[in-house]
Image (cartoon, rainbow, N blue to C red):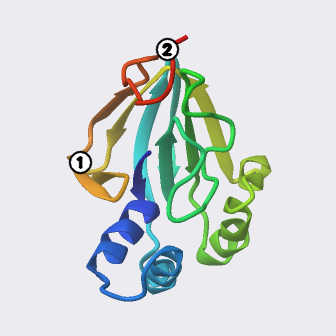
Amino acid sequence: MATLGFSGDVTARANALSWPRGQLRYTLATLLQLPRLRTLPVSVDVEGTHVSGDTTLLAIGNTPFFGGGMRICPDVEPDDGRLQVVSIGDVPRRTFLRVFPSVFSGRHVDRPEVTTAIGRSATVVGADVDVWADGDRLGPLPLHVEVVPRAVLVAGVRPT
């Protein structure tokens, strides 16, 4: 899972907290970061489909979950060879707060403020902002992500 914008800012804030542990850390970091909600200009290309615009949160994942149980990319699985790009557009805090709870069920992707795309690769360019992956800072944009099926061998799983 790679993320930027509000979700990246929350990850940075959560990493700086020594308490609480687990999912509550991300919930607290979200509340602390909400006054600093900002919009970032980005351009995303998913296998030739190009989308430009402002985003408050952008996530790219080949697994559904991030942040201690949020189903941010609900339409992909780790073994389906695809990634999903999810963007919450330029929204005010009030709207963001209405969208946020639906992230736990994955229903946020049905909202008009949210855009999604699915493919095997994605490229993101735009603002001078850090990208985070699974809680670690990757560095600033640009970012290119590609799913390589069966690239990782997992002990106890037979290759198909």
Decide which of 41, 87 is in the foreground and name it: 87
* Drawn side of residue 62 relative to residue 132, left or right: right
Decide which of 123, 73 is in the foreground and name it: 73
* Drawn side of residue 44 relative to residue 144, left or right: right
Instruction: Residue at 38% x, 61% y: name it.
Output: 8
Describe the element under mark 1 as helix, strand or loop.
strand
- The location of residue 89, given as percent across then percent down, is 58, 53
> Are there few (<14), some (14-19), or many (20+) residues within 10 Å of tag 2?
few
> Are there few (<14), some (14-19), or many (20+) residues within 10 Å of tag 1?
some
Mark in the foreground, 2 or 1: 2
Looking at the image, can residue 129 be seen? no
Would you say the residues marked 2 and 1 are in contact, meaning their CB atoms lie under 8 Å apart? no
**Residue 148 vertical position relative to residue 33 in the rendered view, above or below:** above
Give the residue pinned by disc 2.
159
- The location of residue 42, given as percent across then percent down, is 41, 43
Q: Which quarter of the rendered picture does the N terminus lie within? A: top left
Sequence-earlier tag: 2 or 1: 1
* Drawn side of residue 64 relative to residue 137, left or right: right
**Residue 137 vertical position relative to residue 21 in the rendered view, above or below:** above
Describe the element under mark 2 as helix, strand or loop.
loop
Most extreme residue toward the front is: 156
At label 2, which amino acid type do we have? Pro
Instruction: Residue at 55% x, 10% y: name it.
Output: 160
Instruction: Residue at 65% x, 42% y: name it.
Output: 115
Give the residue pinned by disc 1.
138
Determine which quarter of the picture holds residue 95. bottom right
**Residue 139 vertical position relative to residue 117 in the rendered view, above or below:** below
At label 1, which amino acid type do we have? Leu
- The location of residue 78, given as percent across then percent down, is 54, 33
